[in-house]
Amino acid sequence: MAYQHSVCAATYLFSSLKEVMAKAAPARSGDFLAGVAAETYAERMAARMCLATIPLKHFLEELLIPYEADEVSRLIVDSHDTRAFAEISHLTVGDFRNWLLSDAADSAALKRIAPGITPEMAAAVSKLMRNQDLILVAAKCRVVTAFRDTIGLPGRLSSRLQPNHPTDDAQGIAASMLDGLLYGAGDAVIGINPASDSLPALMQLYDLVDEVINQYNIPTQSCILTHVTNQIKLMEKSAPVDLVFQSIAGTEQANKGFGINLEILREAQQAALSLRRGTVGNNVMYFETGQGSALSANAHHGIDQQTCEARAYAVARHFSPLLTNTVVGFIGPEYLFDGKQIIRAGLEDHFCGKLLGVPMGCDVCYTNHAEVDQDDMDTLMTLLANAGVTYIMGVPGADDIMLNYQTTSFHDILYLRKLLGLHAAPEFEKWLMTMHIMDGKGQVLPVTQNHGMLTNMPRKLLPPP
Amino acid sequence: MNPKNPVEPNPSQPPLIRGGADSALPLIRGCWRGFEPNEQPATKPLSTLDPWQELKRFTSARIALGRVGSSLPTREVLDFGIAHAMARDAVHLPLDADALEAGIQSLGFTTLRVHSKAQNRQTYLLRPDFGRSLDDESKQHLPTRKSSASIDLLFVIGDGLSALAIQRHAAPLLAEIQNCIPAAWKVGPVVIAEQARVALADEIGEIMGAHMVAILIGERPGLSSPDSLGIYLTYAPRVGRIDAERNCISNVRPQGLHYAAAAKKLVWLAQEAMELKLTGVALNDESEVREVLANNT
């Protein structure tokens, strides 16, 4: 339907809900590239004012992509919990923001209503929120998941150990893994982005991480971030698969570009569940997302990139993942130009994910052709840690030598834990103390040549020092 | 001595300055001496060293960096900073097209200069589509199919995301290609394209009526590879070709794939492409396999 809003003696017309939402979005290069952004500052504010008056109920009637045309739309509609929605169904988008910031919206209330919120409602309200609002509300959301340890408890900050190597060299990967473990990283997952997609090479990587986890009896899980269909094939060949990974997006067509659909994800989830490898929980999926992926596949349907991104969280939520993270600065400056845009996008993604009940982490990262540097990364990671981000990445020295981008380091995780008094997942933290890697206060302990981690490394991986 | 920076700087080589057109090859992870803390021998060192230094031989990842408290030592902050600075300069310092042109002409090639629709770097970064099409002036002065009939393999040199890469590597790579390209092939003038994306070569190749086009282009700089050059080969170039219809040779630089090996690979691919009348996923790179077979017979 058409919308209009008059402000300061001018009347702005918007032909559809998706146009209101796109024009209400904070300025970012990807929306300009798609031609959906507001043309003036005043038009952007008019769109926000217009959006604030739209009832949440209306989002269930005017779908951004028709039900018949898109399986993600069907998933959003079919899985909508009307009972959970009842509590907020009388609100407009503007009042939804007020409610979220009110003391009535405590952790229990937010958890109760999460299944009643659609991604479009979350995206809409985020467009009316300042950075501090996104941080404050996300910090109230609790999303707890478990596999071999428990992720997302209050006062905790977990990390993915990402020991990538440009040629998947086993010793190179093992060296980075040991480096990370000795810095206390890896409680969310030990996850490798492989350079190869050959099944025998991938099988070797699964065996490698599994051997390290078994050798030291680490309460964590492994993941090899190859295409989901490879992981299904490898599970059929009895590979030790803990978490199944896949990149996902917010439209059926964009997912098709990734070579997946909901049925394939369902099949992978069932296969992983049947392995029964979790000890304290059964969240077996790991998803990655990122603003701009739908537009880059030319599959955005005229929807702004942040709303497309929020729709991906509906896909994630459906499969009860252990972990989901937005790879916020990876896509390049044509989608998120500079530090300001990346920081804003990271906070939006984390907020929308958490509001919808997704265990949201963030790959706080950038490429060298974007207007960003380490100071921007420090800002975003510090804001996200205050917002209760579930986990961030841990790469040696913040420099991923396989993916050629910069993300957060083991040192960064220690900085955040020290600054804000945050801890690793409880089972993992206990292990760190048992292994004399950290003390009870989360302080890294000095390591000597004969530390058990160095002397007990699987022999075929690394010779003892 | 910083164990990660074992290479002493060579005083005879000038530091990399604007444009970096000199042939100095800074190894990013070793081009400076490293920050040495000025500590009295009797005092306790401020930073904690990691005793797993020897694991560095297994990976170029930044492991065993040590810590001050739980933060990075100054040495490592600066080491990362210089690597990032090199990558940033590679993206933003403009191509010295005159110097590049002179280098290519000295090999015996004629040259042409064109420019994409992206008038500056900011536009280039924000509008990838502009980097994929020629500006009006370039379009008009390119020789057309008729005047440049039957070019077999046309070379386009594009700055891409690292002008530094082509400034350094394009001419020596072309020299190696000259050594192994079939003598009968007509290559035509070498086209130097500013603010170029890979697909710009499709339009250039189409206008000039080339059977094949190879674009030598600066790749997105990594923290330890600011000057990596990529080659994309496309058979029957025309506007609208997709990436699956090209073959790519990546990471061409002295610390990666060497000029001679890259040249050989390209010529092998081009000969196969001519035979099969296509490039892309249907043309697998078996040049190394073939070479092994050839050496065994």
Image: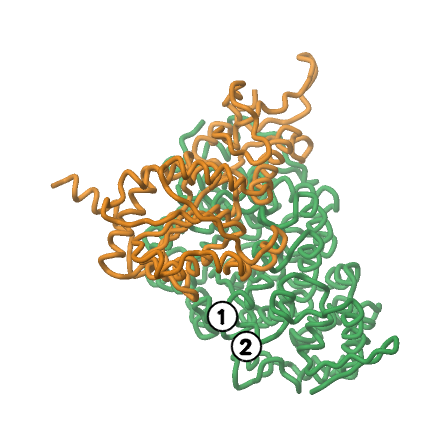
Chain colours: A green, B orange
| Visible residue check, residue A425 | no
Contact (Cβ within 8 Å) of mark 1 with mark 2:
yes
Q: Quadrant of residue A233?
A: bottom left
Check the image and report above or below for A38 versus B271: below
Q: Residue extending furthest left? A: B297
What crowding class fits label 2: few (fewer than 14 Cα within 10 Å), some (14-19), or many (20 or more)? many
Q: In which quarter of the image is the C terminus of chain B?
A: top left
The residue at 67%/35% (across/down) is B71
Where is residue A298? Give x, y as percent. Answer: 52, 70
Check the image and report above or below for B37 versus B56: above
Q: In which quarter of the image is residue A349?
A: bottom right
Sequence-first tag of 1 and 2: 2
Left or right of A463, for residue A301: right
Q: Which amino acid does label 1 sit on?
A: Asn
Label 2: chain letter: A
Q: Which mark is residue A456?
A: none
Label 1: chain letter: A
Q: In which quarter of the image is residue A115?
A: bottom right
| Visible residue check, residue B118 | yes
Where is residue B6? Give x, y as percent. Answer: 50, 23
* Residue bearing the label numbered 2: A72
Where is residue B92? Give x, y as percent. Answer: 60, 44
